[in-house]
Amino acid sequence: MFESLSDRLGGIFDGLTKRGALSDKDVSAALREVRRALIEADVALEVVREFTEAIREKAVGAEVVKSVTPGQMVVKIVHDELVAMLGSDAEPISLAAASPVTIMMVGLQGSGKTTTSGKIAKRLTEKNRKKVLMASLDVRRPAAQEQLRQLGEQTGVETLPIIEGQSPVDIAKRAKQAAKLGGFDVLILDTAGRTHIDEPLMVEMADIKKEADPHEILLVADALTGQDAVNLAQNFDSRVGITGLVLTRIDGDGRGGAALSMRAVTGKPIKLIGTGEKMDALEDFHPNRIADRILGMGDIVSLVEKASENIDAEKAAAMAKRMQKGEFDLNDLSEQLNQMQNLGGMGGIMGMLPGIGKMKKQIEAAGIDDSIFKRQQAIISSMTRQERKSPKLLNMRRKQRVANGSGSTVQEVNKLLKMHQQMGGMMKKMAGQKGGMMGALGGGMMNKLMGGMGGGGMPGGMGGMPDLSKMDPKELEAMAKQMGMGGGGMPKLPSGFGKKK
């Protein structure tokens, strides 16, 4: 997400921060490059103009030119304006209404409305402990209602029984009645889409809105459509009146123009972003954190929150006890690799670590990507239970068998065993420390993984990162604020972070 824009802006600001004093001419030249980078990222032209002018007013003048760190002052100004453009504060889905709170999902066909409805329902059920009912009002697309029913079964969320021949307005009316009688907290209405905006669609949306009286009308838009998504938001808002936006496929959009434009153009908040195909791949949209990522400052807060949701506290505690006794076998290594994948894989984790974006090319050149996890897991899976429990059993003949079974080479098997040995020693040292997996990320585990995977360790001396496991929440919060994260501060870090739901 935002990779190309982040790379461009990183290069521009590196040039500024390396200089001592800055002239107005230097700042103006940098702003021209920023403008070009935003346009190439598919940000709406009117938004680019307003954004660069706002920066120019604050950056060109004595305050910045005479600053002790003028380059960093410019970066801070750009960061603050990015946050303002994206909406300043996170605005989650509002449930401040009488039950059942009705959420109406709108958008074009293929934008991911039905899947997003299921994701939101799952999220409200698990995180907010709400009783949710979903209803499909799409009577045109073949099997649309059946798709929502199956998503309901998959996520454990109830869906309105399908009755053939009913109109979307009739289904909305029946859904409201069922939600009230069933004591549901939230009702999600998944409406029909079209391949393009047309009058019948808008009339249907207006009729459903009148009948259902929704508290939230969320427009689901595909981030990959760029400026078309912005035009779509304007059209739906003018005709139906949306309360917020959900951007899907944000993980596949390296430019980020839609996300940067939609709030500024429509004035409506981006409430959620879809970050993958899995049903839990849905995140709150935090403008300050997104600005941090764009400017290469990382996003430690989100990484900690993600860890708290995905790391099983009981498993972490059991593993810590075993590691204190010097026990760390290949089953444990496999579990650690699984945890890394649950946190978003190599790309997801590294994108949230400060400064790592500048090393992207070096990391790619070293051949390090998410496929490494699969290769490592395949090697471990090709071993017998005894071999995973006691790696010393792996002689040359056994290694060759494992390599053949996993489609790898003996050299790769040896690298895995060496990584396991190094990590075993490191894990024993940090056993019992506060922070668990996050401590490992901050204290050297990432470096060991890199080295063992053939990357020769983290480029640029990343082994010198602060050990997050040794920092208390106040220190983490202070570090987050220094990086421009600000806002809500750091969440509490209990041992193991919290139970996996």
Image (cartoon, helix red, strand yellow):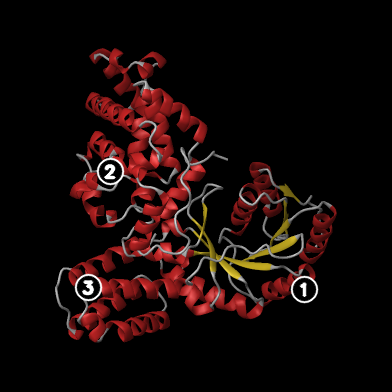
Vertical placement of 353 versus 196: above or below? above
Percent position of residue 307, x then y: 45, 44
Percent position of residue 352, x then y: 36, 53
Name the quadrant of the C terminus. top right
Q: Is residue 4 visible?
A: yes
Q: Which residue is mark 1?
A: 210
Crowding at dot 1, Cα within 10 Å, few <14 / some 14-19 / many 20+, comes out as few
Secondary structure of the residue carrying numbered label 2? loop
Q: Disc 3 versus disc 2: distance between alpha carbons?
A: 32 Å
Residue drawn at (36%, 61%), measured in percent from left and top? Answer: 293
Q: Disc 2 versus disc 1: distance between alpha carbons?
A: 53 Å
Indicate the quadrant where residue 425 lies.
top left
Q: Which residue is mark 2?
A: 368
Name the quadrant of the N terminus. bottom left
Indicate the quadrant where residue 397 lies.
top left
Q: Does 419 sit left or right of 238 as displayed? A: left
Q: Which residue is mark 3?
A: 71
Secondary structure of the residue carrying numbered label 1? helix
Q: Disc 3 versus disc 1: distance between alpha carbons?
A: 53 Å
Secondary structure of the residue carrying numbered label 3? helix
Query: Which callout, 3 or 1, points at the residue further toward the start of the chain?
Result: 3
Crowding at dot 2, Cα within 10 Å, few <14 / some 14-19 / many 20+, comes out as some
Percent position of residue 19, x then y: 14, 72
Percent position of residue 137, x then y: 73, 60
The three-letter code of the residue at mark 3 reads Gly
Residue drawn at (48%, 39%), measured in percent from left and top? Answer: 311
